[in-house]
Image (tube, rainbow, N blue to C red):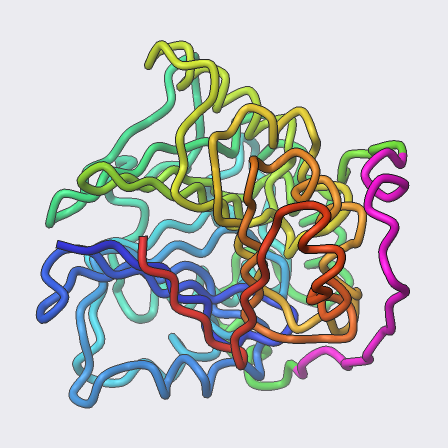
Amino acid sequence: MSLSIEMLPANHGDCLWIEYGDPDDPHRILIDGGPPYARGRLEERIPDGGCHFELLVITHVDADHIGGILSYLARLPEGVTFGDVWFNGWRHLPTDARGPVQGEMLSATIEQRALPWNERFGRGAVQIAGDSLPRVELPGGLALTLLGPTRDALAELVPFWRVEVSAAGLDPGSSEEALALLHEREGLRSDVRGAEAPDVDRLATRPFEEDESAANGSSIALLAEFQGRTVLLSADAFPSQVRRAVLKLAAERGVARLPLDALKMSHHGSKGNTSIELIELLDCRRYLFSTNGKIFGHPAQENVARVVLHGGDTPELMFNYRSPTNGVWDDARLADEHGYTCTYGDGRLRVEL
């Protein structure tokens, strides 16, 4: 029995393919779909004749997570099915607000395809509504613990969503208008940023400022566990929220640090989404970065430096692309001095846990 996480080629975004159980007949989870122009890479990964996913998670409404899956679902081929779809649309916000443009289009597509939507949460919001962390067991025995978002984080989306929908000229909640707009959207422009040789100690001690994006704060963050193996899937979540959830889990389990086989770095390794305080709560060896470094220059050197200094005795930095931004860490002198290793994919990187 196995558990693997595969970062698919999603440019500067996330598209995660998880398999667990019998390697010859695995159960599957799909998390996000990258930006719109990453749809083709997802199509290439689908087996001939289609396949079943126990769960599809669209973590939040940013284009580099939602765009590719929105485009894929609009052309959903026969034979591809989902046991449930977790996505917080306009109907799941704690007010009468409506979703942002791509959120509106995805909501309309889910409805049009008659896909199961947040069934494990009674068709309500995928959220932490009280003191306990919701836990769901999927067919095949994989357990998911919800680490975020909270109800308050979803409420923070309200003004952002209203502005976005109005600016696009949509009538909030109109499935017809949203579906018509879907085929007019274009992807983001890509630029390559260079990087200087890192000074690890200086970078790791730079003042930390947490991300404040309402969309990122609404991310569905999950702890996946299967037969003693564990991976934290943090989407673009705020480190303060993930840290609160980890503290609760660690206390419940009577451990000082939460054991992990891998951490999928939040927000592609952005400098405002993984704090030293969070890293030090984790007993983790593998750190997964999903990005080609274009547009935003992720991962931030400060973030990688924090992992190198605080991520255990021999942290493994695992990048699904090699880029000018992350290539500087493939340095024998630095690696020997700080005791880390690097692994690079060609856009695709599969990690067996």
Q: At 18% across and 45% down in the image, what residue appears? A: 138
Q: Nearer the viewer, residue 173 or 49?
A: 49
Quarter of the rendering containing residue 101: bottom right
Q: Nearer the viewer, residue 151 or 207?
A: 207
Q: Is residue 324 above or below residue 198?
A: below
Side of 132 where 318 appears, left or right: right
Q: Is residue 81 above or below residue 36?
A: above
Q: At 66% across and 42% down in the image, what residue appears? A: 307
User: Start and end of the magenta stretch?
Assistant: 186-206
Q: Is residue 110 above or below residue 279?
A: below
Residue 88 in percent (x, y) is at 47, 46
Q: At 41% across and 59% down in the image, what residue appears? A: 31
Residue 334 in percent (x, y) is at 75, 55
The N terminus - image quarter: bottom left
Main SS, magenta region, reads loop
The answer to whether residue 215 of the structure is visible from this angle is yes
Q: Nearer the viewer, residue 248 or 3?
A: 3
Q: At 29% across and 36% down in the image, what residue appears? A: 121
Residue 198: in magenta span: yes
Residue 277 in percent (x, y) is at 67, 24
Side of 72 where 189 appears, left or right: right
Number of numbered callouts drawn: 0
Side of 107 where 309 appears, left or right: right
The answer to whether residue 159 of the structure is visible from this angle is no
Residue 113 in percent (x, y) is at 29, 70
Residue 68: in magenta span: no
Quarter of the rendering containing residue 243: top right
